[in-house]
Amino acid sequence: MIANRGEVIWQAKAACRGPHAIVFFPPSHPERKDERMARERIAKEICRTCTAMQDCLDYAIRIREANGIWGGLNEAERKQIIDRALPGPRAAASA
């Protein structure tokens, strides 16, 4: 997918860029719950300092990103937002 100009701008100024970006996505090996929670906590702390946080979250929700911390939320937290926004029985069924 090619990003539009607005996406390139927020991504370029995102606080998650750089060597610490690894904490935003699960490792390729199995991760214990306490390790996942610690990794996500670090990523979310970085997000809270980011001026692009809302743009990032909007993007992740729009494309329904299934992995990682985006806009300060993990996969399950973003899914809750998407489910609440869905009209009709699908939203009620997932609650």
Image: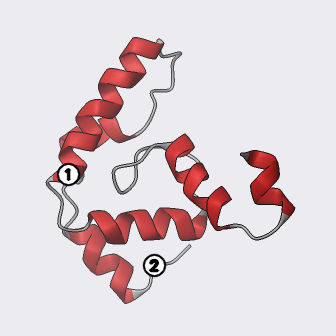
Residue that lies at the very extreme toward the bottom in this rendered image: 5
| Amino acid, disc 1 | Arg
Residue 54 rendering spot, x and y as whole percentages: 32, 68
Q: Which residue is mark 1?
A: 48
Residue occupying the point 49% across, 62% down: 60
User: Is residue 18 in sight in this rendering?
Assistant: no
Residue occupying the point 33% across, 78% down: 8
Residue 29 rendering spot, x and y as whole percentages: 51, 18
Residue 90 rendering spot, x and y as whole percentages: 82, 58
Q: Quadrant of residue 21?
A: top left
31 to 78, vertically: above or below:
above
Return the mark for residue 3.
2
In the image: residue 73, left or right of residue 42? right
Q: Secondary structure at mark 2?
A: loop
In the image: residue 13, left or right of residue 7? left
> Closer to the camera, 59 or 83?
83
Q: Nearer the viewer, mark 1 or mark 2?
A: 1
| Amino acid, disc 2 | Ala
